[in-house]
Amino acid sequence: MAERFASVADVTERLRSVSYLADTGIAGVVFLADRLEKPVLVEGPAGVGKTELAKAVAATTGSRLIRLQCYEGLDEAKAIYEWNYKKQLLRIQADREHERDWETVESDIFSEPFLLTRPLLEAIRADEPVVLLVDEVDRVEIETEALLLEVLSDFQVSIPELGTIVGKRRPLVFLTSNNTRELSEALKRRCLYLHVDYPDVEREKEIVRVRVPGIDDELAQQIAKVVGSIRNIDLKKAPSISETIDWARTLLYLGRNEVTPEVLGETLHVLLKYQTDIAKARKELGVDAPASPASAAAARR
Amino acid sequence: MQWSRLDHAMRSAAGAAEVGVLPADPTLLDVLQGFVHELRTAGLPVSMTENLDAMRAVEHVPLDDREAFKTALGATLVKHAGHHKVFETVFEVYFSMFGPGVRTADGDGEGGPGAGGPDFEQLRAAMEAAGAMGTVSDEELARMLLDALVHMDREQLRMLAAAAVARYAGMEPGRPVGGAYYLYRTLRQLDADGLVTKMMARARQEEQVGAGAFDERLLGEEFEGRLKVLKELIEAEIRRRLVADRGVEAMARTLRKPLPEDVDFMHASREEMQQLQRAIYPLTRALAARLAQRRRHRHRGTLDFRQTIRHSLSYGGIPAEPKFKRPRPSKPEIMVIADISGSVASFARFTLQFVYAMQSEFSKVRSWVFIDGIDEVTRFFDEADEISEAIHRVNTEADVVWVDGHSDYGHAFEVWHERHIREVTKKSSVILLGDARNNYHASQAWTLAEIRKRARRLYWLDPEPRGYWDTGDSIISEYAPYCDGVYECRNLRQLQRFVADVVEA
């Protein structure tokens, strides 16, 4: 089977070509996931680009991204497969006149056309290359996790009426978690573990430059530094990478080419979403509140 | 070929190893197994599968790429963010000889297999070539260091760190002193505390920095970060030398630290306390989430007789479809009563953090603190925006001293009983935190009996090891019969178990 990536450097390079800047850790784990054919469990604070990573990998390998969004109460029928019972009922009714024996009817209604595939089964049966993203896996109950285990370890699904369906080609699998609860050991054992944290100043600057075309070097550097500094403050919710990008866009749009305390004061709400956080950051950084409502309104626009 | 090269590096690394898991002449596999063994000893749950995965993973990375090697081991062996620090330390010890520079040391890796290992030899050679640092004066060295820091020249910094350790740490082979001592000596000689100020002054001279307080803060932070890098480099250098002197396993043993979840609350350092604080939030959130989940899942209440009969009319009076009442979502109410006397001082800090975290997750949490008097502190936690503020107010404003400021559980419970017993209902869970060291006062255990009679649950968390219970003036067993559970709660792991138990109950 052809590998998707030639080396760690190749991973970095190709992720970069789709505007995702991976550090050595991220690229290293993606490379291993490809070689060892193991799923990757990605953990880290909200907004560091966990989901984005899966999307970028899909884009750069030319694979289809199949996404399973997890939530409390997710079950087999929504994650793996379900029989389309309405269609089955219709079929049985339509068959009434033909007086067919039960065996024929049964084998008829439990066949492909009546199967509703859900993300996991879809990923297994796909002919084309696929990246499977199981998003926010910490949201499902422990009991539901067990469902994932069979799929993740053997990459097959057993459907009683059809038999066991084995995947044609192992897709790259990413599971993301915000760590709202401890995942089971069994699940962790089956995955490679990748902890993604906020980027350092250098990497964040690069991210800003790649994602916000037209921004100049100096400003990107300043933005990265200021955001890094804000993350050092003990806040309810530290600014995420996407918020950094939003902020950079805001500054560009407002035609600012330098981050001064005044500019920061006017636009802080792009980075921070809690009033208490904003107040605290203002105090810590020695930045005043916007002078007039007009300028604040301009910034908000 | 790669394997043999690494083997060589490994062999010199482990050359000085004492008797232990490592055989006298270890191969890569031996060293990796020793490494995994050490991780397990440190408390990381590394399973057989994960071990095998790690062995498979390292086959796929170029072995002279240290970062990739580390990533491969980390991704396969460590599945918990909190464990990463331990992993890092153990990795540094086991693979310290396998440091930066090996990549370029292709041909001349045959240096002395004794004291230094190829990497170290090479570094020293580079150092000597780079300007004979053996002869430069202390002032000169300090100046070069400042230069390197201000312009963030990593290579230069690494060499200078090595030179500083050689000069100032005063390391002698076989001396039974920990790395922290050498680090302290080196940093003191370099005047590490003054370095940031010096860097700032220097930056101002070179006009790298604007005038405002804002710019200054940013730059200050950046310099702090660089100083941290320098410290890490010095630490790495010291570690490398210690490993060369004492051998890998002995070194790993000295550096072994408890995992975050095993850190004793009573003896936690400041830094560990901060980590604990971060860990407590998810725990209380888990508690809140699990309680909420239970409510949502048990969506059937008791039989609604009226509805059932009404509905049965459409089936000709046969109650074919029983109807149930929607359960009223019962809001759990939690009452926390905590000892904050001197004997549990550091535990009390943790306790207050726990209470604070609980209060920000649950709407109905009330809290009291006591020494020999007792005072309600719910308002401090509700009003405070952050934990330090709340703790400060509790310590300064709460009225907890009655006679002499020595714990008196009996009196505190009695007063609490008198004031609040009527507020305890079937919905309230009461949690008591303390070591039950009562200074030989009367226990007044009947108050707990009363509380238990009215409350849903009554728990006691004791920060002392079980072995110390009922020794000296501890009278935990006088209170225990009235509690639904008495838990030893000295670290996060035990707290987690308690939370799980409460949720199950």
Image (tube, grey):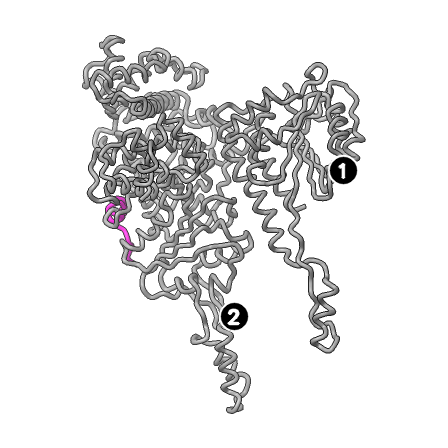
Q: Which mark is residue B471?
A: none
Most extreme residue toward the right is B446
Q: How many marks?
A: 2
Q: Residue B422: percent from the left, percent from the top?
A: 76, 36
B205 in the magenta segment = no
Quarter where residue B472 is shown: top right
Residue depicted at x 78% and y 25%:
B443
Q: Quadrant of residue B401?
A: top right
The answer to whether residue B229 of the structure is visible from this angle is no
Question: Which amino acid, by three-letter code, is at mark 1?
Answer: Arg
Image position, residue A289 (x, y; %): 36, 31
In the image, residue A12 lies in the stretch drawn in magenta: yes
Whether the residues at callouts 2 and 1 have beta carbons within 8 Å, the answer is no
Tell me what residue is drawn at x 27 percent, y 48 percent. A15
Residue B77 shows up from this direction: yes
Q: Which residues are magenta?
A: A1-15
* Amino acid identity at mark 2: Pro
Q: Chain of mark 2?
A: A
Task: Please say if B254 is above or below B311.
Answer: above
Q: In the rendered image, which residue does mark 2 sit on?
A: A160
Does residue A227 sit above or below B126 in this rendering? below
Alpha carbon separation for disc pair 2 and 1: 52 Å
